[in-house]
Amino acid sequence: MTTRRLAAILAADVVGFSSLMGQDEEATLARIKDLRREVIEPKVQDHHGRVFKTTGDGFLVEFQSPVEAVRCAVGVQKALASNASEESSQGLQLRIGINLGDIIVEEDGDVYGDGVNVAARLEQLAEPGGIAISGKICDEVRDKLPYSFEDRGEQEVKNIARPVRVYALRGQKPVTSGRESRTPRSSDKPSIAVLPFTNMSGDPEQVYFSDGISEDVITELSRFRELTVIARNSTFAFRGQSLDVREIGRVLGAGYVVEGSVRRAGARVRVTAQLVEAQSGSHLWAERYDRALEDVFAIQEEIAQSIVATVAQRVVDAGEAAARRRPPEDVRAYDLFLRGLRVDDTFTPEGQARVEALYEQARAIDPTFARAYSGLAYIHLNRSIDVISGVRPQPDEHKISALRLAEQALALDPNDPRVHSTLAYVCLNSRDFERAERHLDLARAMNPNDAVIQIFWAWMQGVRGKPERGMTAAALAYRLNPRHPLWYDMFFARLSFQLGHYEEAAALLEKRIYASPARHLRDMGWRVAAYAHLGRLDQAASCGAELVREIAAHWRGDPTARPSDYMDWLVWSSLLEKAADMERLRAGLRLAGLLA
């Protein structure tokens, strides 16, 4: 019995094998044997790979993780370089190619398919002692590993129908974003990156507090239309890296960088901040604030105003003053909220329960703190979304609670754009499209530099049948957050699908659901439809069968439901308003052999 799966394949062979064999067969074979035993097998084991085929001068390895595949390749090449003077490996060099693709696995463990074939072709394109990777691998690892990648362009390779984008792995340098092709780099507005403020309190547990201040400075700066402000998770990726601020500015596309530190002691807090011009490294402004803890919000606003005055040469007008978020009455509520925010992206039931407890404590201490209500609204909405209770499920207790909490947050602080975007997202998931769009429009007007609001607004346009408008906002979201989380790609993939860009949609969805497909059933459905529209019908049928099995395993609705009911749920829960968009999705599912 054969099976299919997505895997990272590493292919390698010895450079100049025929020539080496011609000089001394026995010695060459002995050295290759030593190479496998002393270098290859230990490195593959360290990185959780599996050697599934060896030849006289090469080997093929399967990895579940593209990151581990690249780490293994780098480790092998470094070991060969450092052992070049040793007898066992003297004179041996490898070429290595790595690809991410669909593979066929036989009962005996052997592997076939284009995923393997492309890796073998990439290996032939690699330099002696070098590593060549495909575009899919590069997209997966470039924001996770400290290496740079040289784009070699699209290459025609033997027996592969479409050209393959090839990258050569280079030295250990800061990585750049994988979204240059869809991210506008030029802007007339000054761009600013706020690095995570350093926790100087002497207690590592206080890092959540310094992170919270850093994020709130980002939020304050984002209110100013004259600035482009890089999102939090892009700038926080540089935590702990001893990089020159000029290099950070280059990587993030920022003209200015904000650095700072926070020292908290009892009821006092000391915050230092400085503004640096990224290109020259020169300091434009610096200040130290030594205040009571309750003044932390005033400090954030002063920092933002000082930076804007220096960079954008302007003063806050009345409209922007009205858009300020309302600070909590009790700073303890803010402290608890920051503790929860730090682990808010832990989507296990246990992790969400911990976050919920912290937000509830914050609300109990300060019942007027709007952000605690918004945080709780998201937790309840996530619990509702995770349950498949029927084709067109009625609002359950969690969805009702999410709406109630989001509306309470709005009543408490109608000037916070994230409050509006939270309510909009809750309304969207209840298919109240007009109300959702109205509040997202308000959020976007209040804070045009918030990447999360921009990507939500982009998908809102797709929901309402205007994907072209959505693409413009999605490109801005990528610009504001070049190291964005993978869920951004879900929205971009769906917009691409609506526009008929099925290849890009499929590639993005493959990456999003690679590790845990069961968590992303809707994405699995869109991927199946994209494969089918591309004519990759065998792949679509195989993935479609897996989709039906997974939905059945998670179904909590009518126990007599059939696969056609599963597809109705998938289309309905994809939150499309226009019949033409729903039919495009259904058509792809039908091409894959599903009853849609």
Image: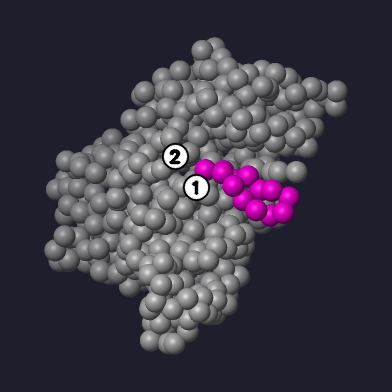
Residue appearing at x 48%, y 39% in the figure = 508
Residue plotted at (77% across, 33% down): 552
Look at mark 2 in the image and give the residue it sits on: 160
Mark 2 element type: loop
**Three-letter code for the amino acid on which mark 1 is drawn:** Asn
Q: How many discs appear? A: 2
Q: Amino acid at mark 2?
A: Ile
Left or right position of 286 against 125: left
Q: Name the residue rendered at 35%, 41% in the picture.
A: 156
Q: Residues within 10 Å of mark 2 (few under 14, many from 20)?
A: few
Where in the figure is residue 218, as x and y percent of width and height?
A: 35, 52
Residue 104 colored magenta?
Answer: yes
Farthest residue, direction right: 560
Q: Answer with mark 2 or mark 1, whichever residue precedes in sequence.
A: 1
**Which residue is the extreme one toward the front?**
22
Residue behind mark 1: 117
> Looking at the image, do the residues carrying marks 2 and 1 touch, with CB atoms under 8 Å apart?
yes
Looking at this rendering, what residue extends furthest in the top direction? Answer: 579
Q: Position of residue 270 (x, y in %)?
A: 36, 71
